[in-house]
Structure formats: C-alpha cells, structure tokens
C-alpha cells in the first residue's frame, strides 16, 4: 500500500474512533446541515451525525483506490500518481476537519460554516489546479471532455490553462470568507464560469487541431 493510501486509511479509522468516543456525549438530534447564511436547517439522529461521514470516507477510499487499477490508461495515471495521492490525502483531511467542526458545533462550540467551508473548498480547488497541471490523459481524473480525451495535445493545453484557472478560483473562493453573505456566489460563480470556459476551450483547440491536419 502506498504512503498516501495508508494516510487516507488512517483518517478513515480515526473518523470511526472519534464517532465511537463521542457517541454517548452527543445530543439525540444533531445539527447535520447548514444553509448559505450559516444557520442550521436540518437535524439528524446521533448515528447519522457521527457516522455518515466515516462511512462516506470508506466509500470514497474504495473508489479512489480502484481508479488507478481500472482505468484503461492506468500507465498514464502512474506518471502523476504522487499528485493524485496527495489530492486524496488533502481531501480526506479537509473532510475530517469538517467532521470535527460539526462535532464541536454540536458540543456548543459554534464557528460559522461560511468561514470553514469556503476555506476548505478554496484550498482543495487550489490543489486541484496543481493536480491538473501534472495530469496525463486518462478516463477518470482531470478535465474529461470528448475533445481532451480524443487528443493528447488538446488534453495538455486544456489542463495547463485549467490548472492556472483552478488556482485562481481557489483563491477567489477563500476570499468569500470576507463576504459571508455572498459566500455561495463566491463558490458557484467562478466554478461554473471556469468549467464552461474549459469545455469551450477544449472544443476550440480540437477544432483548430483538426483544421491544421486537414491543410
């Protein structure tokens, strides 16, 4: 098992241990969801509040471990496997942090989710930018449009600019911490614009490549 896989598995185990240790101290109904204003808008049972995320981590762990094994272009994934493993570790750490934050909230130690969530998402986006810059063509990881998957050159160009854009988006999302009433806008607007732009960009680059070959 690779180092990143061991760390991810350790985080899964730690989450279950935390859930078991905190079970008797949690209220029967736990806050489990917060709206865009940072207010609780849904509650769940103690079991749901403490074990939904650990079981989610189990599922994610299995999926992330399977991807490099089942991808037809697995040899390409191995070329940037270090960045992929680091992404998994970062993602799991952020989820564990959110899990601990929700437990503390239910203990009465309340910190606005409009500080926690955009910071975590922003950091994740920034690292995804690094991952994209190093990703080789494959079927599961990266900007997978019909045109990036059909051309190595289009894949490389799209991921080069995509990596830069994702880093910028990550920083913009983190800025949302200072504008908490509009935090959802800071997350969705740049994310959707970037996704749309990269789809169009990959199509344009593919068409340009086709026209070059036809000349």
Image (cartoon, rainbow, N blue to C red):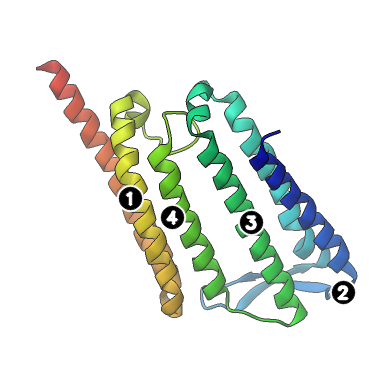
For image coordinates 19% across by 23% down, the residue present is 210
Crowd class of label 3 (few under 14; some 14 to 19; many from 20; radius 10 Å): some
Q: Earlier in the sequence, mark 2 or mark 3?
A: 2
Mark pair 1, 4: CA separation: 9 Å
For image coordinates 52% across by 78% down, the residue present is 37
Disc ID at residue 13:
none
Q: Earlier in the sequence, mark 2 or mark 1?
A: 2
Q: Position of residue 121 (x, y in %)?
A: 50, 60
Q: Secondary structure at mark 2?
A: helix
Is residue 31 toward the left or the right of residue 128 in the image? Answer: right
> Which quadrant would the N terminus be assigned to in this image?
top right
For image coordinates 56% across by 45% down, the residue present is 86
Tag 4 residue: 126
Tag 3 residue: 93
Q: Secondary structure at mark 3?
A: helix
Q: Earlier in the sequence, mark 2 or mark 4?
A: 2
Question: Mark 2 or 4, which is nearer the eye?
Answer: 4
Disc ID at residue 164:
1
Tag 2 residue: 25
Q: Is residue 22 above or below residue 76?
A: below
Q: Residue furthest front?
A: 3
Q: Secondary structure at mark 1?
A: helix
Q: Do the CB atoms of the residues marked 2 and 4 lie less than 8 Å apart? A: no
């Amino acid at each position: 098992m690779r180092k990143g896989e061991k760390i991810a598995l350790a985080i899964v185990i730690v989450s279950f241990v935390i859930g078991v240790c905190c079970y008797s101290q949690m209220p029967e109904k736990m806050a489990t969801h917060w709206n865009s204003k940072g207010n609780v808008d849904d509650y769940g049972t103690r079991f749901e509040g403490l074990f939904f995320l650990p079981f989610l981590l189990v599922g994610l762990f299995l999926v992330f471990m399977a991807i490099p094994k089942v991808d037809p272009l697995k040899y390409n994934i191995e070329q940037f496997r270090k960045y992929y493993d680091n992404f998994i570790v970062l993602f799991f750490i952020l989820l564990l942090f959110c899990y601990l934050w929700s437990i503390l909230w239910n203990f009465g130690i309340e910190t606005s989710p409009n500080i926690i969530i955009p910071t975590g998402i922003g950091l994740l986006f920034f690292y995804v930018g690094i991952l994209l810059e190093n990703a080789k063509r494959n079927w599961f990881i990266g900007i997978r449009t019909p045109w990036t998957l059909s051309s190595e050159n289009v894949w490389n160009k799209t991921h080069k600019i995509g990596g830069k854009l994702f880093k910028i988006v990550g920083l913009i999302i983190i800025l949302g911490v200072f504008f908490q009433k509009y935090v959802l806008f800071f997350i969705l607007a740049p994310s959707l614009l970037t996704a749309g732009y990269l789809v169009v960009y990959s199509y344009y680059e593919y068409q340009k490549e086709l026209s070059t070959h036809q000349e």
